[in-house]
Image (cartoon, rainbow, N blue to C red):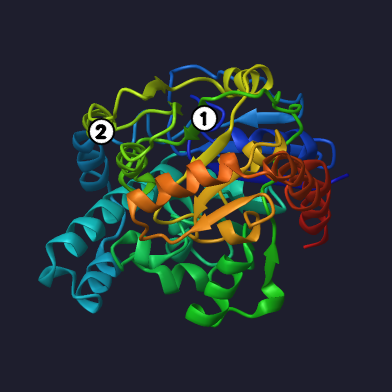
Amino acid sequence: MNKRILIFTDSFPYGHGEAFFEPELQHLAGFFEHITILPLEKKGGVCRRGLPANVTVSEPPFNRLKSKLSLLAAGIFNLSPAGSFIREGFASRVFFSRYRFRTWLAHLLMIRHLLSFIKKNNLSSELKSHDLLYFYWGLRWSQVLPFLPAGMVPKTIVRFHGSDLYEHTNGGYIPWRKSQLMKIDNYLTVSETGKRYLIETYKIAEEKIFLSRLGTIDYGINPFMESDRIRIVSCSNLVPVKRVDLLARALRHCTRQAEWIHFGDGPCRKIVEKAASSLPSNVIFRLAGHVSHDELADFFRKNHVSLFINVSSSEGVPVSVMEALSFGIPVIATDAGGTSEIVNDSNGRLIPVNFDPADLAEIIETFVGHGKYPEYRLNARKSWEENCMASKLIPAFTDFLLSV
């Protein structure tokens, strides 16, 4: 146990995000001499989560990345070279597309600031003092790789989920993506779908890609209770890709007594509220907002849930779905990304990404009323044990990290 690893996160351990990284970190701490975490931004102002003794956190470059004015100032007023960014702009013809130009500019500003931050804080020596650089996402921090001087960077490992992998979920354009991929030593994907995408789209050698599902830990079993009311739970940020308003539209067609609870918040809240305001009297709903992961797990342990539903247009392998399966809750989900690798006809239902809301309502009522419904609950838990149990997946991932 003599390796040192530097892990780049979006905000962990600040705020509430990246909760699924926590069990991974706890395990890695037992196998590395020292772990340094370098978040991109600070959320919540204080370190909210406890860390193992051999883990330290470096000061993030941003207090709040989503502040457009601060990003603009940070990206312009620094001495990082701009030539390669301009060349990328012309090569990608960003000046002929408003969306591409805005995407290119936002990434340019962010990465110029990160490069300046690295130089100003003399992080080159920090990088070299570690055996591995592990980027938890395929966007943001890992996009500095093409611009770092040769010899500054040790072995690099980048994990790709879903939104940070597929160009089609990013308006068809991720700036300097090919240059970034060329600078990565090993690639982690959370799904077979993602692995195939890297191989087929970017011709990445298969032996450089390690399939590393995130997995979830065991929080117990959801209690089963016979009821005339269907209780549906969904859980995600309220952002466009999650399309939670489509679930509200589907529930307008329900004829049975139903209760829908959504955990999570975000910029699309008003859109969801508007869609849910038209629900019939037999369907009650509650937008529970953001809750801690512990609160969510406690809810699942104590309250019967008939179905967990996810209607995203794009996914990696959704952690929220894995956790629902771990509780023995059947799942109805769109066939997006790697979702089909964990949801099937034995533990739930896959529906097309472009589904008809009325069809989803019919599937919900038919599924819960099926005579095999108790069997679906057993299969949900069994499929989690076979494919998504963190206590099996994380040790294999750790062995991989130690071997590179």
Q: Residues within 10 Å of mark 2 (few under 14, many from 20)?
A: few
Q: Secondary structure at mark 2?
A: loop
Viewer-side residue, 268 vs 115: 268
Viewer-side residue, 372 vs 392: 372
Number of the label disc, if any, that sits on residue 67: 2
Name the amino acid type tagged 2: Ser
In the rendered image, the vertical position of residue 217 relative to residue 212, given as above or below: above
Pick whichever of labels 1 and 2 is earlier in the sequence. Answer: 2
Horizontal side of residue 75 vs 285, given as left or right? left
In the rendered image, the vertical position of residue 271 relative to residue 126, given as above or below: above
Q: Secondary structure at mark 1?
A: strand
Q: Residue at x 45, y 66 (%)?
A: 146
Q: Which quadrant of the structure image shows residue 354? A: bottom left
Measured as percent of width and height from the top left, residue 161 is found at: 54, 55
**How far apart are labels 1 and 2 at the CA level?**
41 Å
Mark 1, mark 2: which one is toward the viewer? 1
Horizontal side of residue 248 vs 370, given as left or right? left
Q: Which quadrant of the structure image shows residue 275? A: top left
Q: Residue at x 53, y 81 (%)?
A: 200
Q: Which quadrant of the structure image shows residue 143? A: bottom left
Measured as percent of width and height from the top left, residue 35 is found at: 71, 38
Measured as percent of width and height from the top left, residue 359 is found at: 39, 53
Pointer 1 residue: 230
Measured as percent of width and height from the top left, residue 6 is found at: 64, 45
